[in-house]
Image (cartoon, rainbow, N blue to C red):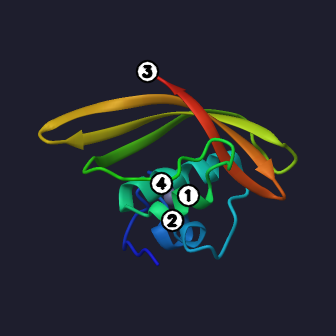
């Protein structure tokens, strides 16, 4: 179980316990593709490899998720398309900021999500 006091790393301005926390802990499913995307960013930020594996589509999931020493320092969701409670597919465009070995930068990605048996899963993404 991952714990982080205070605001959620995903930048929602909600408390972790009322945002991504219950999703990472498996108490609640992400209701939308954007919620799942936020929870996966939070899992990267907190080093929760289990959540990343569980929420990765089996078709594209790597055999193992190895987190490096990248520090994820902020998330901005730019746009969401579909990915709601009535949808089977969705995309989320976001910018994630990172720091690693004295360098910092931002990753801009459009991620694709698919819903299988009521669960949103990350499929793949295009980033620059
Ligand atoms: Zn969150």
Number of numbered callouts drawn: 4
Disc 2 target residue: 50
Circles 1 and 2 in contact, beta carbons < 8 Å: yes
Helix, strand or loop for disc 3: loop
Q: Residue at x 55, y 58 (%)?
A: 53
Q: Residue at x 31, y 47 (%)?
A: 73
Cα separation between marks 2 and 3: 26 Å
> To which quarter of the image does residue 91 belong?
top right
User: In terms of depth relative to the viewer, which is nearer, 54 or 77?
Assistant: 54
Q: Residues within 10 Å of mark 3 (few under 14, many from 20)?
A: few
Cα separation between marks 4 and 1: 8 Å
Q: Which badge, 4 or 1, is on the more N-terminal residue?
A: 1
Q: Position of residue 36 (x, y in %)?
A: 62, 53
Circles 2 and 3 in contact, beta carbons < 8 Å: no
Q: Which badge, 1 or 3, is on the more N-terminal residue?
A: 1
Disc 2 versus disc 4: nearer the observer: 4
Q: Residue at x 29, y 50 (%)?
A: 68
Disc 4 target residue: 64
Q: Residues within 10 Å of mark 1 (few under 14, many from 20)?
A: some
Disc 1 target residue: 53
User: In terms of depth relative to the viewer, which is nearer, 31 or 51?
Assistant: 51
Cα separation between marks 1 and 2: 5 Å
Q: Residue at x 67, y 71 (%)?
A: 28
Disc 4 versus disc 3: nearer the observer: 4
Queried on whether the Cβ of the residue with tag 3 lies below 8 angstroms from ligand 1, the answer reads no
Cα separation between marks 1 and 3: 23 Å
- As drawn, the residue found furthest toward the right would be 86
Disc 2 versus disc 3: nearer the observer: 2
Disc 1 versus disc 3: nearer the observer: 1
């Amino acid at each position: 179980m991952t714990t982080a006091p205070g605001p959620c790393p995903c930048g929602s301005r909600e408390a972790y316990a009322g945002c991504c926390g219950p999703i990472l802990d498996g108490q609640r499913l992400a209701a939308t593709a954007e919620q799942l995307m936020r929870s996966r960013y939070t899992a990267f930020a907190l080093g929760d490899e289990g959540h990343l594996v569980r929420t990765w589509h089996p078709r594209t999931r790597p055999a193992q998720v190895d987190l490096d020493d990248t520090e994820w320092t902020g998330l901005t969701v730019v746009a969401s398309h579909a990915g709601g409670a009535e949808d089977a597919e969705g995309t989320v465009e976001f910018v994630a900021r990172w720091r690693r070995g004295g360098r910092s930068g931002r990753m801009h990605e459009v991620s694709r999500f698919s819903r299988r048996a009521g669960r949103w899963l990350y499929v793949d993404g295009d980033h620059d």
